[in-house]
């Protein structure tokens, strides 16, 4: 059977692996200790925070069909949030999200989606791929310590564009597209409180601020009653502070959160900040995935489409559909 290595166990990698698993021997390599990529949940003894993607929508029929069994299984649920827009010249604008466009979250955390999709797949967690080298008629993958991880007929990278560019062999014909692709960073502030924190919204878009978003994390379905907030910094501010000490970033974001809310929040029992170097990208022109059939290499991710959860799915689906005929025509 054709051997396929998929690098990355985010939504793109897991979607791709599941689509190919019936047609090839697929192994997924993931540098982190969990599934899901930016579909991430940070947990402590008392608190849990969705510190990556805050929610997602499904505009395409294909993504809605993909989500249907996850909704039926209780892994994905609709977040009926009280929504507000903060900042700007006028007063806060509060409304209920449009019900015709459901806003989905993982349940009981965003990371539940990755765990569900990874079930039954051969996923090697905490395994960072360091090199991809040609070995006879195959690609040998080695970890960052130089140890061989196996020989594969195809290698498919779903890491962020910058990381994929650094990893792919020189003769990968997608390098020109990768060189033109730049993802933007984002900081996520996580605050956990002893008692309830009452706000007039569950989710808020923030304008004219170094913050861009605020979530009352515990308002999402399936969460515990522990009071938790997540605030995201704008991509522009994050890009300017990617190398700033995290304690300074935390202090600046905490101060700005109080300013935006127009009140001082109580002292947090738990406060932390996470740096996402590759978090977002505007809508991208060109193909939804990169396929180099001659060298049996490929790449996909939200960076091929746009920086949303659905973009990651659409890119992986596109690569799978282009690759499946080639797998069928290649003897195992």
Image: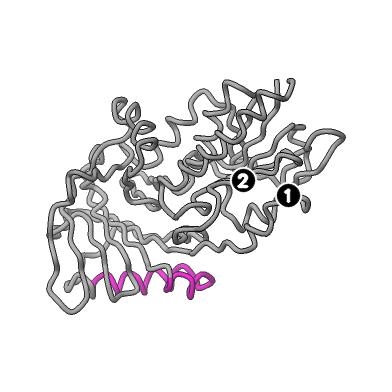
Is 241 magenta? The answer is yes
Is 166 magenta? The answer is no
Q: CA distance from mark 1 to mark 2?
A: 10 Å
Q: Secondary structure at mark 1?
A: loop
Q: Are marks 1 and 2 in contact (CB under 8 Å)?
A: yes
Q: Nearer the viewer, residue 202 or 155?
A: 155
Which residue corresponds to the image point at 13% horizontal and 52% vertical from the top-left?
Answer: 96
Query: Badge 1, how many Cα within 10 Å: few under 14, some, many 20+?
Result: some
Q: Nearer the viewer, residue 142 or 156?
A: 156
**Left or right: where 305 falls relative to 261:** right
Query: Badge 2, how many Cα within 10 Å: few under 14, some, many 20+?
Result: many
**Left or right: where 217 falls relative to 145:** left
Quarter of the figure with residue 87: bottom left
Which residue corresponds to the image point at 37% horizontal and 46% vertical from the top-left?
Answer: 44
Q: Which colouring convention does the figure follow? A: one colour
Residue at the extreme right: 136
Q: Nearer the viewer, residue 50 or 304?
A: 304
Q: Secondary structure at mark 2?
A: strand
Q: Position of residue 170 (x, y in %)?
A: 77, 53
Residue 117 lies, with reference to residue 83, above or below; the image says: above
Q: Position of residue 285 (x, y in %)?
A: 51, 58
Which residue corresponds to the image point at 55% horizontal and 44% vertical from the top-left?
Answer: 32
Image quadrant occupied by the N terminus: top right
Magenta span: 236-258
Residue 25 lies, with reference to residue 194, above or below; the image says: above
Name the residue carrying label 1. 172
Name the residue carrying label 2. 299
Quarter of the figure with residue 322: top right
């Amino acid at each position: 059977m054709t051997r396929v290595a998929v690098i990355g166990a985010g939504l793109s990698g897991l979607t791709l692996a599941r689509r190919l698993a019936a047609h090839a021997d697929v192994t997924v390599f993931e540098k982190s200790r969990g599934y899901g990529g930016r579909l991430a949940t940070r947990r402590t003894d008392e608190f849990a925070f969705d510190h990556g993607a805050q929610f997602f929508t499904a505009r395409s029929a294909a993504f809605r069909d993909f989500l249907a069994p996850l909704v039926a299984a209780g892994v994905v649920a609709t977040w009926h949030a009280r929504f507000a827009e903060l900042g700007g010249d006028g007063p806060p604008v509060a409304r209920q999200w449009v019900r015709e466009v459901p806003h989905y979250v993982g349940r009981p955390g965003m990371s539940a989606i990755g765990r569900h999709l990874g079930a039954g797949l051969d996923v090697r967690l905490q395994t960072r791929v360091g090199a991809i080298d040609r070995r006879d008629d195959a690609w040998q993958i080695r970890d960052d310590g130089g140890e061989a991880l196996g020989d594969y007929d195809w290698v498919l990278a779903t890491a962020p564009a910058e990381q994929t560019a650094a990893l792919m062999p020189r003769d990968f014909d997608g390098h020109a597209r990768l060189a033109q692709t730049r993802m933007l960073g984002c900081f996520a502030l996580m605050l956990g409180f002893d008692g309830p924190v009452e706000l007039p919204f569950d989710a808020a878009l923030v304008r004219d601020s170094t913050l861009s978003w605020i979530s009352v994390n515990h308002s999402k379905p399936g969460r515990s009653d522990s009071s938790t907030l997540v605030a995201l910094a704008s991509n522009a501010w994050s890009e300017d502070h990617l190398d700033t000490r995290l304690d300074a970033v935390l202090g600046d974001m905490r101060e700005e959160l109080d300013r935006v809310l127009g009140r001082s929040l109580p002292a947090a029992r738990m406060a932390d900040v996470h740096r996402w170097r590759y978090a977002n990208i505007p809508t991208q022109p060109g193909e939804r995935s990169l396929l180099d059939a001659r060298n049996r290499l490929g790449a996909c991710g939200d960076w091929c489409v746009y920086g949303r959860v659905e973009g990651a799915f659409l890119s992986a689906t596109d690569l799978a559909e282009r690759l499946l005929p080639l797998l069928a025509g290649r003897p195992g």
